[in-house]
Image: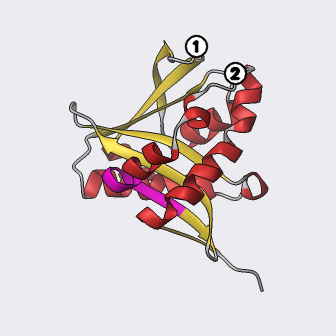
């Protein structure tokens, strides 16, 4: 019998594993755009540590190994900005990303008072777009990221979270 993947709040001790996992997971996104300067690949370990300490961060664990993560924080307009959702390539396609997203949405709505959720992904990232649309996100705009990648902005109201949770 194999181990099951658990979802829990990240701790400061998880920062280095999150940092390494993020670097591994976003390689495919960088290749998709031919741009290896995207934010998740150039973020420093210290910056990841600060986010783990200050933001709402969840990890997926397989035993002691962090195999997925997501981050979120409530912005000034009451929206929860969710980002850097990633799952180890060997475990993608098993619902871990959706579980991480649900955990972040729950915490951001229930504990932090988010009124809606907002995230973005590259315009060529079809797998990401499928996931986000499947769980109720809708496109609300486009913007060019600081790294030059065209991003699709998606949002979901917290009422929709309750229906998909």
Question: Is residue 10 at least partly visible in the picture?
Answer: no
x then y, percent, for residue 162: 36, 53
Question: How many neighbours does mark 2 have within 10 angstroms: few (below 14), some (14-19), or many (20 or more)?
Answer: some
x then y, percent, for residue 85: 55, 45
For the N terminus, the quadrant is bottom right
Describe the element under mark 1 as helix, strand or loop.
loop
Residue at the image point whose x is 61% and y is 75% from the top? 64
Residue at the image point whose x is 23% and y is 36% from the top? 78
x then y, percent, for residue 155: 41, 32
Q: In which quarter of the image is residue 116?
A: top left
Which residue bears the numbered disc 1? 148
Q: Distance between the residues labelled 1 and 2?
A: 9 Å
Lateral position of residue 23 relative to residue 81, left or right: right
Residue at the image point whose x is 42% and y is 63% from the top? 12
> Is residue 82 located in the magenta-colored stretch of the structure?
no
Lateral position of residue 90 relative to residue 97, left or right: right
The dot on residue 35 is 2
Find the magenta span and give its range.
52-59
In the rendered image, the vertical position of residue 25 relative to residue 6, given as above or below: above
For the C terminus, the quadrant is bottom left
> Is residue 56 located in the magenta-colored stretch of the structure?
yes
The dot on residue 55 is none
Badges 1 and 2: C-beta atoms under 8 Å apart? yes
Colour scheme of the rendered structure: secondary structure
Lateral position of residue 85 relative to residue 30, left or right: left
x then y, percent, for residue 91: 74, 58
Describe the element under mark 2 as helix, strand or loop.
loop
Lateral position of residue 133 relative to residue 126, left or right: left
């Amino acid at each position: 019998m194999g181990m099951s993947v658990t979802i829990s709040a990240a701790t400061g001790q998880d920062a280095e594993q999150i940092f390494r996992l993020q670097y591994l997971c976003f390689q495919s996104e960088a290749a998709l755009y031919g741009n290896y300067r995207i934010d998740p690949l150039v973020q420093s370990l210290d910056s990841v540590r600060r986010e783990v300490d200050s933001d709402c961060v969840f990890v997926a664990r397989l035993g002691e190994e962090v195999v997925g993560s997501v981050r979120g924080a409530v912005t000034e307009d009451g929206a929860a900005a969710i980002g850097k959702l990633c799952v180890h390539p060997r475990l993608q396609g098993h619902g871990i990303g959706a579980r991480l997203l649900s955990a972040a949405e729950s915490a951001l709505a229930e504990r932090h008072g988010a009124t809606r959720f907002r995230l973005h992904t590259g315009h060529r990232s079809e797998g990401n777009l499928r996931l986000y649309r499947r769980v109720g996100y809708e496109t609300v705009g486009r913007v060019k990221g600081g790294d030059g990648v065209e991003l699709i902005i998606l949002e979901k109201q917290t009422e929709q979270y309750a229906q998909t949770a």
